[in-house]
Image: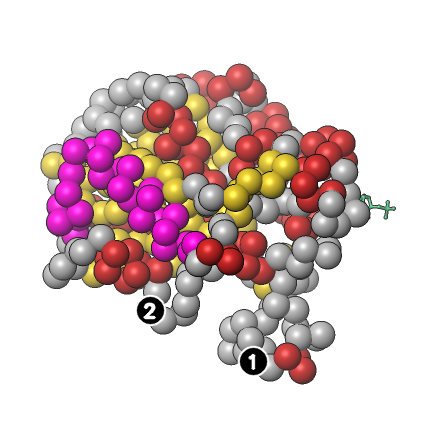
């Protein structure tokens, strides 16, 4: 292999509002005990929509932190990728807005739509772009503001999600040695079409545009979910992706230092770790403070792990995600 890529930095963008479970219980019929025991969530963060805060603000915060940690300038980046389903606008896309805000010139950026799988799908793409020789240093985001699509009267969905952005910078490694170098060792992504509509946002696209309110009874503009179906698919998908990846790489799970799963529900995380035979004390969990930030979860987790000095050079980090679509996958990174 001529080129590989390694993650050299991470950052996170946090929204300015915080809502505890008790705060939500004043808006919708729910309670802290139900949310905590069913999901592990204690609080979540939402953008301050009224004050004009946007997903671009979150991405710019995450990017600035990642650049500062890597001691790089925005002009050192040659491609921007965003995994998101909640860009400020369809056009311009999120990556274009970030490029504009960071004053980047002469480079490209585009978005990938893979719901909660967004960060991993962007990582997979960035790694392939760097391996191909087309790019040297890629800034990726997993970011979502699902509060824009939450029905705050629907307690079965609105308590589960939060807003947030995670960023990582990937850099070319020349003639990498997969047996010892810091690098992305591999990734696998999958899409199984969700024929049962278990996890959807049905309006806002071209089938039922936002202005066609007459269609919104049939095609909801909100996140809609069949919780138990999604739960089963999530555990199955994440176990499958991680197992296939480790088998292909011929690396036993006992060599993995950290398991960093998508943060959708603590019980999904625990069950996935159990099926993978991985001890919970080396599973990174922050769903209690963030809830499910959709594409945001993995970048935010890696950034917090970097902040807490949990990631040491040489650590094997297994990332595992699942989201609407269904899109799911895993990546193994040597830090
Ligand atoms: C959503 C989820 C937490 C629900 O947990 P569950 O144990 O399956 O709960 P159920 O849906 O069976 O609901 C049980 C009861 O709690 C009630 N309930 C649902 N949401 C509630 C809430 N926020 N507060 C209080 N009660 C609630 C239900 O109405 C139901 O009441 P009933 O028995 O009187 O009908 C769980 O299915 C889940 O996490 N699924 C995966 C969702 C997910 O992660 N999606 C994103 C993937 S990327």
Main SS category, magenta section: helix
Q: Report the residue that reaches farthest toward the right.
A: 29
Residue 256 in view here = no
Residue at the location (69% across, 44% down)?
Answer: 24
**In the rendered structure, which segment of residues is drawn in magenta?**
53-79
Residue 245, quarter of the rendered image: top left
Pick the front one: 240 or 181:
181
Mark linked to residue 92: 2
Residue 335, quarter of the rendered image: top left
Q: Earlier in the sequence, mark 2 or mark 1?
A: 2
The image quadrant where one finds the N terminus is top left
Residue at the location (52% across, 44% down)?
Answer: 17
Q: CA distance from mark 2 to mark 1?
A: 19 Å
Instruction: Name the residue carrying label 1.
Output: 211
Pick the front one: 166 or 231:
166
Residue at the location (42% across, 50% down)?
Answer: 143
């Amino acid at each position: 292999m001529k080129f590989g890529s390694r993650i050299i930095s991470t950052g996170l963008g946090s929204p300015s509002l915080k809502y505890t479970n008790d705060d939500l219980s004043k808006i919708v019929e729910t309670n802290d005990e139900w949310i905590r025991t069913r999901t592990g969530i204690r609080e979540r963060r939402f953008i301050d929509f009224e004050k004009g805060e946007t997903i671009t603000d979150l991405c710019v915060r995450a990017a600035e932190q990642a650049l500062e940690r890597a001691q790089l300038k925005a002009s050192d980046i040659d491609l921007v990728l965003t995994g998101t389903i909640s860009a400020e606008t369809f056009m311009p896309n999120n990556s274009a807005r970030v490029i504009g805000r960071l004053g980047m010139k002469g480079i490209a950026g585009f978005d990938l739509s893979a719901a909660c799988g967004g960060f991993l799908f962007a990582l997979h793409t960035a790694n392939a772009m760097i391996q191909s020789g087309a790019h040297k240093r890629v800034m990726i985001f997993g970011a979502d503001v699902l509060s824009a699509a939450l029905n705050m009267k629907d307690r079965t969905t609105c308590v589960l999600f939060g807003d947030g952005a995670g960023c990582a910078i990937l850099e070319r490694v020349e003639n990498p040695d997969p047996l010892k170098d810091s690098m992305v060792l591999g990734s696998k992504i999958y899409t199984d079409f969700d024929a049962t509509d278990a996890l959807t946002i049905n309006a806002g696209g071209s089938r039922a545009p936002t202005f066609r309110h007459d269609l919104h009874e049939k095609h909801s503009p909100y996140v809609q979910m069949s919780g138990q179906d999604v739960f089963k698919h999530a555990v199955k998908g994440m176990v499958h992706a991680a197992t296939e990846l480790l088998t292909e790489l011929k690396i036993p799970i006992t060599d993995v230092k950290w398991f960093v799963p998508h943060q959708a529900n603590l019980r999904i995380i625990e069950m996935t770790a159990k099926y993978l035979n991985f001890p919970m004390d080396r599973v990174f969990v922050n769903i209690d403070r963030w809830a499910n930030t959709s594409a945001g979860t993995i970048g935010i987790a890696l950034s917090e792990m970097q902040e807490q000095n949990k990631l040491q050079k040489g650590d094997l980090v297994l990332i595992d995600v699942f989201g609407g679509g269904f899109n799911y996958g895993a990546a193994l990174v040597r830090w």
